[in-house]
Every structure is written in C-alpha cells, then in structure tokens.
Image (tube, rainbow, N blue to C red):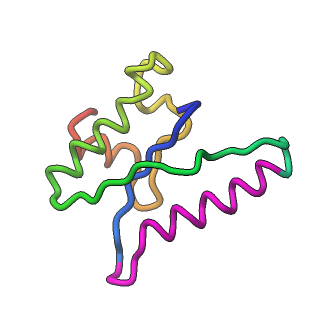
Amino acid sequence: MPDHLHLLLEARTDASNALRFISRAKQLSGYHYKQTFGQVLWQRYGFERVLRNDEQTLVVARYILENPLRRGMVARVEDYPFVGSTLYTVSEILEAIQLS
C-alpha cells in the first residue's frame, strides 16, 4: 500500500521476537530512506496483533491480500507487485485462503 505496510509474520522458534524484528526493520529502512530522500519514513508507533490460531491467520491473510483490491489498485491479487512470501508462492497463499 502506498501509505502503510501489512506484515504477517510467523514465529519459527521460541526465541522469535516480532517487535524486535519490526523495530530493526524500521530502523534500517528508515535510515536509508532518510539518507536518500531527506524525510522520515515511519511514524513512531504502529499496530500489532498476536494471532493464536490458523483460522484467525487465514482471515488476516485474506484481509491483507484483498487490501489493494479494495483500494482499486489492481484487478487481481497476483497483479500487486508487493505481495509475496519467503516461504510460500503466491499461488499457495491464494489457495490456502481460497482466493484463487
């Protein structure tokens, strides 16, 4: 999205820490953005939520993937250039949430 970011993260170990990951990602990307464009990239606070079950996760995944559709930015989820995962193909994600 042009004015915000959605991430759906999965803890892979007991040591996983989403808040630390987000803080570090914002720090690194914000630094490079400010060096390049001279402006602040991120607002100070964000919103995070811990999902406890697979059903809830699929609902959130569907919401995130449909966001560019609701905004009229693309006609199909597959057309949005910033959709993706390091673990799953877009087809696998769409199949899991029954959007394909």
Left or right of residue 73, residue 98 in this image: left
Left or right of residue 26, residue 5 in this image: left
Q: Is residue 21 above or below residue 94?
A: below
Residue 67 in the image: state x and y as whole percent.
39, 29
Residue 42 in the image: state x and y as whole percent.
62, 46
Q: Which quarter of the picture shows residue 25?
A: bottom right
Q: Nearer the viewer, residue 19 or 77?
A: 19
Q: Which residues are magenta?
A: 13-34
Q: Is residue 11 above or below residue 63?
A: below
Residue 33 in the image: state x and y as whole percent.
76, 48
Left or right of residue 22, residue 91 in this image: left
Q: Residue at x 46, y 47 (%)?
A: 84
Left or right of residue 77, residue 58 in this image: left
Q: Image quadrant for the C terminus?
A: top left
Residue 90 in the image: state x and y as whole percent.
40, 44
**Is residue 54 a member of the stretch shown in magenta?**
no
Q: Which quarter of the picture shows residue 27?
A: bottom right
Q: Main secondary structure of the magenta part?
A: helix
Q: Residue at x 85, y 47 (%)?
A: 36
Q: Residue at x 42, y 67 (%)?
A: 18
**Extreme front residue here?**
44
Q: Residue at x 51, y 67 (%)?
A: 21
Q: Nearer the viewer, residue 50 or 67?
A: 50
Q: Is residue 3 above or below residue 20?
A: above
**Is residue 30 a member of the stretch shown in magenta?**
yes
